[in-house]
Image (cartoon, rainbow, N blue to C red):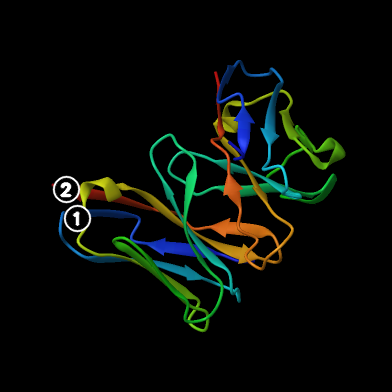
Amino acid sequence: DTGVSQDPRHKITKRGQNVTFRCDPISEHNRLYWYRQTLGQGPEFLTYFQNEAQLEKSRLLSDRFSAERPKGSFSTLEIQRTEQGDSAMYLCASSGRTGDSYEQYFGPGTRLTVT
Amino acid sequence: ELKVEQNPLFLSMQEGKNYTIYCNYSTTSDRLYWYRQDPGKSLESLFVLLSNGAVKQEGRLMASLDTKARLSTLHITAAVHDLSATYFCAVGSGTYKYIFGTGTRLKVLA
């Protein structure tokens, strides 16, 4: 299967702990995105990579959040000192370098619960 | 700043009926996407609309885009229970970012 994969699928952590999520995009895609979705809301853009360069960070991404995409392949999203308000579904998407649609393909998401 | 609104937020309809979901957006864009999301699941792509007047159909769903009115519609024909889900529109912002609507939670009653 060549879809977007995310790991872990579920994470329960205590407030104050650090967590890291991984996203593996579709292999030929050079663009990678992170979104956050809270219950009953639409996904909100967090950050965007083109190859290994992080080109935009939303103001939703506080200093406790950091994302990387070494070598332009997989990406990680780390949340330090988690807070209960960080509980959400974290979605990763990727899109390819050709075509006009920039259609994004979404992974299954990582559901984070902070207790 | 681009804002995307959907209505209705909730829709309960009988099987066999028709209905339309509306997606309005605040600034110019010629890229609009519709996704379906089942509870606890990720987003499934339904339609990609890239130009004014674009119309696409798949089964009982048909989507259209009017860039001048900044409006897209998702029309449901003869609804069936399997269509129960949350539907999101997303508008392309710049060359890469999506701004999502608030979602429409559809429940089709037997």
Quadrant of the image occupied by residue A77: top right
Residue B17 higher or lower than A68, as above or below: below
Tell which of B54 and A48 is nearer to you: B54
Residue A108 higher or lower than B11, as above or below: above
Residue, disc 1: B13
Residues under numbered marks 2 and 1 in contact, where contact means CB atoms less than 8 Å apart: yes
Chain letter for the residue marked with disc 1 in the picture: B
- What amino acid type should be assigned to the residue bearing mark 1? Met
- What amino acid type should be assigned to the residue bearing mark 2? Leu
Which of the two labelled residues, at mark 2 and mark 1, occupies the earlier sequence position? Answer: 1
Quadrant of the image occupied by residue B93: bottom right
Q: Residues within 10 Å of mark 1 (few under 14, many from 20)?
A: some
Q: Which quadrant holds the N terminus of chain B?
A: bottom right
Residue, disc 2: B109
Chain letter for the residue marked with disc 2 in the picture: B
Q: Could you say where residue B2 lies in the image, as x and y percent from the top left?
A: 61, 66
Residue at image location 13% in from the left, 47% down from the top:
B110
Tell which of B63 and B93 is nearer to you: B63
Residue B61 higher or lower than A40, as above or below: below
Q: Could you say where residue A75 lies in the image, as x and y percent from the top left?
A: 75, 36
Q: Could you say where residue A46 lies in the image, as x and y percent from the top left?
A: 68, 46
Residue at image location 47% in from the left, 81% down from the top:
B53
Q: Could you say where residue B56 lies in the image, as x and y percent from the top left?
A: 42, 70
Check disc 1 and report its element: helix, strand or loop.
strand
Residue B57 - label: none
Residue B100 higher or lower than B65, as above or below: above
Work out how far the residue at label 2 is from the one at label 1, CA to CA, in angstroms: 6 Å
| Numbered circles on residues, count | 2
* Horizontal side of residue B58 vs B88, given as left or right: left
Tell which of A105 and A82 is nearer to you: A105
Check disc 2 and report its element: helix, strand or loop.
strand
